[in-house]
Amino acid sequence: MNDIPRAGLSLQDSQPARATGLLASLHLDLPLLTGLLLLTAVGLLILYSAGEQNMQLLERQGIRFAIAYGAMVLLAQIHPDDLRRWSPWLYGLGIVLLVATILVGQTGKGAQRWLDLGLFRFQPSEILKLALPMMIAWYLAEKRLPPSGPRLLAAGALTLVPVLLIAKQPDLGTALLVASAGVFALFLAGISWQLIAALGALMAALGPAVWFLMHDYQRQRVLTFLNPESDPLGAGYHIIQSKIAIGSGGLAGKGWLNGTQSHLEFLPERHTDFIFAVISEEFGLVGVLALLSLYLYIILRGLYIASQAQDTYGRLLAGTLTLVFFVYLFVNTGMVTGLLPVVGVPLPLISYGGTSLVTLLAGFGILMSIHTHRKLLPT
Amino acid sequence: MAQLSIKDYLRESQLFLSRALAAATLVVLLLLLLVGRLVYLQIQNHAHYTTLSKDNRVKIEPLPPTRGLIFDHEGRILAQNLPAYSLEIVPEKAGDVDATIQALSRLIPIGEEDLKRFQRLRRQRRRFDSIPLRVRLSDREVARIAVNRHRYPGVDIRATLLREYPFAAETAHLLGYVGRINEQELQRIDTSNYSGTNYIGKNGVEKSYEGLLHGEVGLQQVEVNAKGRVLRVLESQPPTPGDNLKLYIDMRLQEAALRALGDYNGAVAAIDVETGGVLALASKPGFDPNLFVEGISSKAYQALKESPDKPLFNRAIRGQYPPGSTVKPFIGLAGLEAGVVQFHQETYCPGYYQLPGKEHKYRDWKKWGHGKVDMHKAIVQSCDVYYYELARTLGIDRLHDFLAKFGFGQRTGVDLNGELPGLLPSRAWKRRSRQEPWYPGETLIVGIGQGYFLTTPLQLASATATLASRGRRIQPRIVETIIRPDGTRLPTLSRVTQLPQVDSMHWEEIIAAMTDVVESPHGTARRIRSPDYRIAAKTGTAQVFTLAQEEEYDEETVAKRNRDHALFIAFAPVQKPRIAVAVIVENGGHGGSVAAPIAKKIMDLYLLNKSDTPDE
């Protein structure tokens, strides 16, 4: 298995294959790490502005980043073969915890998402963000790709169980992310385009049928969900204010710390889910394009790592984790700019808040592990 | 794990690569879409959004819809919206809200209830929402606030529309009333649609048609200066007013019914036999629903609640009374249909009835008995003994099943909330609710509409309408037409069920007997005989108070509250029935003397003196 074709992405591996020194011994990938650190720095800078220059807020976020980067380094050390062995167990644990959450979970903000472990509370759904891609990759890598019909159905079921459990909490944002992980894993595993088209058509056909079965009030909710502007006093309020913030930013922006929309408290959740609007207002289109480029760089690097992986498990896992990262980015920015309905998904690595930070960077740790534990690195 | 060949490996690797490229393409395309959106917002519409954000504050204000009006069948207004002034505070602009309220309370009286409501609403709404502190300000109060207004930022007088019911107590039970939205209702409603609305239907038509009467909230985006004054309206989307409702109710009949009840408590239900439309639905005593619109004082509410006459209780759909002898035509029909008795087959009434081998005497209202009785006479003179025997022959099961077809023991499905089903007893019901077997004696008293048997006045009217139309059972309805804001008229629909085939000769025999209740010189309702049209009817008396075996019922000595309820059902004209009426007069004594004239007044008004003014 030496003659792996190197027909790769245009983004070439700039890392010296046998890098010596600290990075190599820590199994870290320099190009990816550089991108992540840059994003972190930008994130803290914007949080300083969005959080009304509150140093305490910044400190807390800094500590979270420290923990998250710790998790990344830790996971980079684990050999992908070990990860693969653990995949089903981690997935099983995640499901058990999800069920436990529904049975005995703490209610926070009206939804049961938290499990109190005595010392601290955490969201079991976060585990699934890593465990589901691992599980699907493990399952699909067992047999030849593309997967056969029954195995496809089984993989679909493996995805649906946690998605439904999370949606029941209810946490639509996380359910969406976990579901996208399952979909992307199957897509990367090579299910036929005809099947993809058929599934798409099925979804489109089921839509009206479900619509017919719904009660009036449920339909109303779906309408509001699809078109928040129809509910300008509820969910739509966020969007209107957010669009004003983005639009008034213009080409060059109002300047760091000078966003009026954000600082006059018109923009709700400005340091969490709607932080993208703050960036757009203060740094303008130029700043946003720079930020999106940085994200694109990280995503392409992730896909490159996936394409270079040496086994199916590594490829599928790395590819899926990278694409889920993109879903974070697109769902959040799409929501803030009014392209997509309002779903509670943070801007990855920038929004204030800890849980997603740790899972995201842990995921990048897995990517680095896959890349740096390759058996034969070309010299 | 399956052993993979090099070939497979290469193929998989290639496959993955092509998919990774496809994914990368998708990522780039979606990001381009996002960039396109950003260019649209930040470059193309930059000027627009800059205006919105620059030094101005853009606020979104709800524009509450106007609640739909309610009309009676002839176009009289039953519920309308009248302008009133209220004092409102915007907490964000007021600064120290408590100090402001303190100061305002020196200008106009502000009650404990006002404060409580204000604090509750303040918790629910945003800081820049306007929250009412006092409502229905008098002109004097408006003037005092207006003069001093400049001293209190964030304080404003607003003209609002208040619901008003011109007929007050006469429509109280029927229409219900609107009141302030409470915590429970807040859980149910779509809060954004109600963001400008303070009131919600609490009862009656106002509640059951809330969704239509309310309408859709509108909104406007306004620009305000730093002090919160509205500078201009940027965008406005007008509210959609609620639908107007035209009822089947004819206020002339409604008023006539209430007037005819006089000082008695009771209920009247009149139904249009053809359409199922409820022409009158009266419950006495009533109350003034206008008191509830702005929140009734707790003292006045206590008085209403604790009154022994129970004015808040809607007797017409929630009052459950034994039907007494008014069920005799129905049971007679059951006997004819089952074939256990012939219409002209005679039996002997000695004034009492005994089950074989039992001591207990089931008495007839006529102490010395009716002598020889057939079904015709048993209905015309309301012989109890005949019906004891018929009920015993039929048995409770057949009785229950036949009466159920007329809707006894079931909600009529009228478009009002809170209707009760009454009770049509059966073996199964007794076992379920009392864990007791059914006793034969209980069948006898069901035969004269007593015992566990309970009906509501509306249910009784509906069953009478079914009888009048010879078996066409139609769901009673209050609302005839829904009139949309654009003028479209939507008729409401009633469920119609045809009773299983009943021998038409049996209908006519029963109806002939009911006609003689009025027409015959021996009929129990002979006093309401009309020269202009023919009425089919049945009187009834429902015991409130059970007498001991040897005691005699003496109207004079029994306390007023223990006196029998008087019942009466009727429909007219006999051959082509248009109206069916049920009357219950609490503690009214005999149905023939007290309840029948009330029904007669309504039928006279409807059939002889119907207003000619077209309602379209």
Image: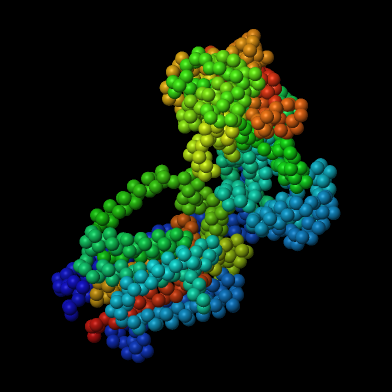
Depth check: give the residue in front, B276 or B410: B410
Depth check: give the residue in front, A33 or B269: B269
Identify the residue at image location x=76%, y=26%.
B556
Residue B363's place in the image compared with A181, above or below, is: above
Depth check: give the residue in front, A283 or B178: B178
Give the percent coordinates (x, y) of residue A236.
54, 54
Quadrant of the snapshot with the C terminus of chain A: bottom left
Q: On the picture, is A53 further left or further right than A95?
A: right
Residue B95's place in the image compared with B609, above or below, is: below
Q: Quadrant of residue A53?
A: bottom right
Q: On the picture, is B471 further left or further right than B323?
A: left
Identify the residue at image location x=55%, y=79%.
A59
Identify the residue at image location x=67%, y=32%.
B547
Residue B245's place in the image compared with B88, above or below, is: above
Q: On the picture, is B14 further left or further right than A258?
A: left
Residue B169 appears in the figure = no
Give the percent coordinates (x, y) of residue B39.
46, 59
Identify the residue at image location x=54%, y=43%.
B434
Depth check: give the residue in front, A3 or A321: A321
Give the percent coordinates (x, y) of residue A183.
33, 62
Quadrant of the snapshot with the N terminus of chain A: bottom left
